[in-house]
Image (cartoon, grey):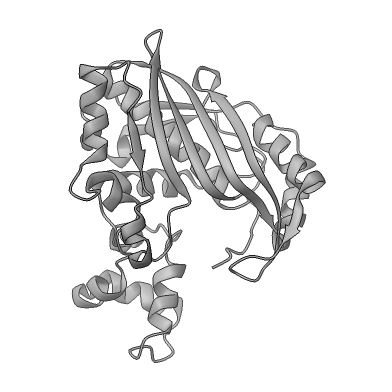
Amino acid sequence: MKAYLDLCQHVMTNGTFKMDRTKTGTKSVFGYQMRFDLSEGFPLLTTKKVHLKSIIRELLWFIKGDTNIRYLVDHDVKIWNDWPYRRFKDSQDYQGESMSVFIERIKSDDEFAAKYGDLGPVYGAQWRNFNGIDQLQNILDTLQRNPNSRRMILSAWNPAEIENMALPPCHTLIQFYVADHKLSLQLYQRSADIFLGLPFNIASYALLLLMVAQVSGYEAGEFVHTLGDAHIYSNHFDQINLQLSRTPKNLPTMTLNPKIKSLFDFKYDDFTLSNYDPYPSIKGKVAV
């Protein structure tokens, strides 16, 4: 994952200090691109341990079109908890409940989960129902009918619904591309939290590429990751410098269950990661 460390170094050296919506402050650059050839291994960060379970569960959640955190918390995935909990704390129903109590109520109380677990029309909603269009199915169909199309695009950025989302999408647009019987994917990400979010995003869209390639009958080519505002929060500088002091290890291998022929049939147990030997995990606080 030298490409990731190169980005970290570039931002730490050349980034402009800016305040942001969370009032944390960042070092930021605008416009950066990384490329990952999936024949060289699965791009899961090795300079710190990354929680693959959360990546897989979240991606399956997106693909289903789900927008309620109940599925995630039922599988002990915590990455979306902060936003609905903040909304609950701002409501008249809040009586000092801790995050752990909030999550237990999401798990056990159907009415509470429906009211406070839903994030609005975030990623999965837009992927499967963008103003009535199933964008994901359209791409799968186009890959069969016209793989040379330059219109195999999926957008999570729906201006008409941004105000109804708990968090406007950071990874906003993807495009598929076929050449030499290889399928590649480019992601445009408007906002990239380099320490916490970006390692998840890299692995998630690389995994999506592997999945779509398999069910469409292609080899996986490149994952191209284009960033808009690429930033490191000021309370993550030490964590980034620690990673920069570590030498990247060999990339692991991701194997998919070859029996799966539909993107919508994948289950958690259909993914096997091998030869992953990362450095220990590094803690960091999410900026909400």
Tell which of 248 and 263 is nearer to you.
Answer: 263
Location of residue 216 in the rendering, given as x and y in whole percent from the top left corner: 27, 21
Q: Look at the picture and state if 104 lies above or below 264.
A: below
Q: Position of residue 70 (x, y in %)?
A: 29, 63
Occupied quadrant, residue 251: top right
Residue sitting at x 61%, y 64%: 285
Left or right for 194, reference 62 = right
Evaluate whether residue 259 shows in this view.
no
Of all residues, the one furthest to the front in this rendering is: 160
Q: Residue at x 28, y 16 (%)?
A: 217
- Relative to 79, 18 lies left or right: right
Q: Is the residue 114 above or below the residue 121 in the image?
A: below
Residue 164, position in %: x, y?
A: 33, 66
> Quarter holding the N terminus?
top right
As drawn, 222 above or below 203: above
Q: Is residue 147 visible?
A: yes
Residue visible at 31% across and 59% down in the picture: 160
Q: Quadrant of residue 266?
A: top left
Which of 39/118 is in front?
Answer: 118
Instruction: Tell how many labels.
Output: 0
Q: Position of residue 125 (x, y in %)?
A: 27, 52
Q: Residue at x 28, y 43 (%)?
A: 63
Which quarter of the picture shows residue 80?
bottom left
Quadrant in which the C terminus is drawn: bottom right
Residue found at the far top of this picture: 180
Residue 168 as seen in the image, left or right of residue 149 = right
